[in-house]
Image (cartoon, coloured by chain):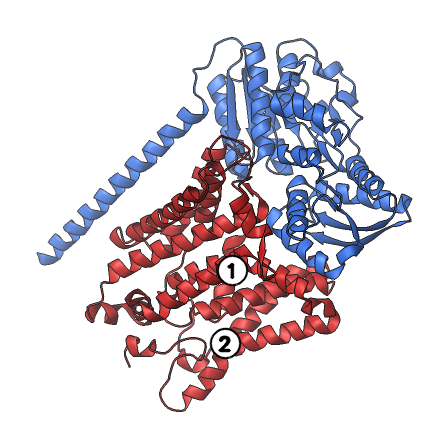
Chain colours: A red, B blue
Amino acid sequence: MTAMEKSATSAPAATSQPGGRGRRWRLASWAPVIVLVLLCAAITAINPNFLSFGNAVRISQAAMIPLVLGLGATFIILMGSIDLSVEGVLTLATVILSLLVLNGANANELGLLAVVVVLLVGAGVGFVNGVIHVRLKVPSFMTTLGIWFIGVGVANALLGGMAVRINDPWIRGLAIDRFLGFPWGVWLALFCLAVALVIQDHTRLGRYIYALGGGEELAALSGIPVARVRIAAFTLAGVFYAVGGILAAAQLGLGNAQIGNGRLFTTITAVVVGGTALSGGQGGVVQTLVGVLIVVVLSNGMVLMGVPPSVQIGVQGLMIIAAVALSIDRKLMRIVK
Amino acid sequence: MVERIRIGATGRMVRRREILKGAATMGIAGAFPGLIARRAFAADTPTVVNSIRSLSNPYHATWNKGGAAFAASVGAEYVTLVTEGNSEKGIADIKAILAKTGGNCVINVDPNDSPDARPIVEAAKAAGAYVVTQWNKPNDLHPWDFDPNYVAHISFSGVPYGKAMADTLIKAMGGKGGIVALGGIESNVPAIERKAGLQQALDENPGVELLDLQVANWSATEALEKTNAWLTQFGDQIGGIWAANDDMALAAVEALRADGRAGKVPVTGIDGIQLAVEAILAGEMVGTVAWDPFWQGGMGLSIGYHAKTGKFDPSTEPKDHREFYGTGVIITSENAQSYYDTNVKAEPALDWNDIWGRVSGQIQYS
């Protein structure tokens, strides 16, 4: 079976496997969804307010940024690489946006043009990630770690440690104004999900990314331009992180160099909990949606259930292990690193 | 033969990479001192040095401005050292500046962690430099044990200000209703003290109920999530939100705004950052406490500078001038505008010679 065949069908009904494994594999790939449903049921049993429309809106608000970040990271993890530059790109995007739109620190008022600039910055940083990784053959872990610090460093230098209030009504409107009861930012995140889904399933880039994750040497021998695919995937991820930065700016109404803190952990957790394997080739953006919902529902639910603050982080750790343990098909794996 | 060529080729490649690496390192190493210590050191007036955690947060950035303002007022060379949260780097940088100035310097340091204070003070004493520490030091390390070089230690008690903010909040709520509270990192001393202050205010106001306290680790992002969950859990029961710092308070305001309730539910913070003062002016927050990092950055140097230049002898000063609590400025809607005009819009004009003006008692150890 080639890598291309393996990725021919996708999420969440999952890949076809030869012989009797098919049924078991499908069940394992549904594990995150089952975890999510059980989680929701447990929280509702303790606090019925969980199912209210208002809370659904709040969960969607909490999920929109991790979702967009997770979409970008999914493509990288599908290739079997890792991207640690999430916080760097997001922080840089937020800070640049806050300085270009109507704000409390300078006279700029570029409006939507600023959004375009920020998306280009995200793409640019992602492109640099990819080029350093591929051309200089630096492992993605180290490349993106470096870019993370550079991104935060540049953001620091731009602001000199201060915070900038964002007054642009368009940007703030993403978090405040609503359509069908949900903030525009949530619709934007869903739009990103749709875009990611199309890229994953209906473009050559998406198929190649799966192929690389399934077996890079095989992919290279089959004539797939490995270097170009890798660079394109990092560039794409950078754009998604920049969108995440725009949403973060909208939500908190300010840009500062600490706005990205802690988001890398949530992003990688959500992708992996959703069922995308760190080894690459398995999973996809729909799994990431499920993973994000698990992480967000859990943290929302622990407050609703009155779990003591000192215990919450431990419960999160248990959930991560449980969700991943349930979704792994151990028969496929001989070596675990 | 073939083998040797291969080894030789590998060797050359490694060397080339090493050279590139070396060149990059030298470039970076060369750029940093250039960024931080721009001017040459003057011979006679002591160099004044601030050692702080980072320049990436408004608090320490303002601290740095205060230091620069003091240095300009006495015409001294000014150096900022940044630990970036790394104790080893913090101590090494201070030793380097001691060596460079031959001990002719005054150091005002916010130690990265409490244990760091001891090696810093010992190194300063050995070099003959004068040092003032703020916030962090071990409880058994006292300035009077290192006369005269360890001039003073300054801290702020979180209890009275945590209580003052809770009182402000309760007043804004009309003396009754439910409060939710956002706490800092559970093991941090300021977080523990501010929470204790909140508890005191709650004990005095039986009509007010603490609905829930969540730890949001000083982070705006986490505070936003916690507040969102509360809006589901408690809804209209929330009469006020107390936050242990301004970042979390501002995030709570944003959560309320997305719910259409910003300005309707009173929120208090602590730290006195610019955006919080602006939020008070906009009616979205009701109070904060300014530690005045501008004062901390400048006055810590001023106290050390006065001792170094012989204006007073630290060893004859009373103990409440050697280890003291500074005074925070409580900001509410009543004084927010005047505070904003004098401290935010304009650079604060402080009398750097009034070195004991904000002493509010000797530090107590529990």
Q: Residue furthest bottom?
A: A20
Which residue does the image show at 52% across and 19% down from the upper left? B78
The residue at which mark 1 appears reads as A187
Which residue does the image show at 45% across and 47% down from the upper left? A88
Residue B280 visible in the displayed image? yes
Q: Position of residue A113 (x, y in %)?
A: 41, 43
Q: Position of residue A34 (x, y in %)?
A: 57, 78
In three-dimensional space, the C-alpha distance between marks 2 and 1, rounded to whole angstroms, equals: 29 Å
Q: Position of residue A74 (x, y in %)?
A: 42, 63
Residue B140 visible in the displayed image? no
- Determine whether, in the image, residue A258 is placed left or right of residue B31: right
Of the residues under marks 2 and 1, which one precedes in the sequence?
1
Q: Residue furthest left?
A: B1
Which residue does the image show at 46% across and 20% down from the upper left? B100
Secondary-structure class at tag 1: helix
Q: Position of residue B235 (x, y in %)?
A: 75, 58
Image quarter where the C terminus of chain B lies is top right
